[in-house]
Amino acid sequence: MRVYVCSCFGITEEQVKQHADSGRCTPRQIASSCKAGTDCGSCVRRIQALLGRGAGCVTRTEKIPPVSAPASLCTDAAEAA
Ligand code: FES
């Protein structure tokens, strides 16, 4: 079943996901590749929501694992405090 995201240009959820899988991870990048969101703009939030669900892209909500610094780097700061 085709679920249209952008009715102005006939862009489906599947097409947005495919664009996302090929590295287009923002509504602006999606717009530049298939024009979705560039006419009435009412689909931009839906596109954003699809991208936010991680359709092939690393989302900003994903946590980056903490970097553990060697203890030797921290001793100077600890002594200065
Ligand atoms: S529905 Fe996408 S630009 Fe209008």
Image (cartoon, rainbow, N blue to C red):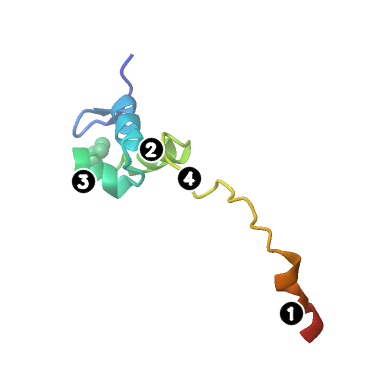
Sequence-first disc among 2 and 3? 3
Q: Quadrant of the C terminus?
A: bottom right
- Rounded to the nearest angstrom, the CA distance separating label 2 from label 1 is 47 Å
Q: Quadrant of the N terminus?
A: top left
Residue for badge 2 = 46
- Residue at the image position 42 percent from the left and 34 percent from the top: 55
Give coordinates of residue 61: x percent, y percent: 54, 48
- Residue at the image position 33 percent from the left and 41 percent from the top: 23
SS class, disc 4: loop
Residue for badge 4 = 59
39, above or below 2, in the image: below
Residue projecting furthest to the top? 1
SS class, disc 3: helix
Can you tell which of label 2 and label 1 is closer to the viewer?
Answer: 1
- Residue at the image position 31 percent from the left and 36 percent from the top: 22
Can you tell which of label 1 and label 3 is closer to the viewer?
Answer: 1
Depth check: give the residue in front, 26 or 2.
Answer: 26
- Rounded to the nearest angstrom, the CA distance separating label 1 from label 3 is 48 Å
For ligand 1, give the image quadrant.
top left
Residue for badge 3 = 32
Q: Which of the 4 quarters of the picture holds residue 46?
A: top left
Sequence-first disc among 3 and 4? 3
Is 50 on the left-hand or right-hand side of 27?
A: right
34, above or below 67, in the image: above
Residue for badge 1 = 77
58, above or below 68, in the image: above
Crowdedness near tag 3: few (<14), some (14–19) or many (≥20) residues, C-alpha within 10 Å: few
Give coordinates of residue 41: x percent, y percent: 27, 45
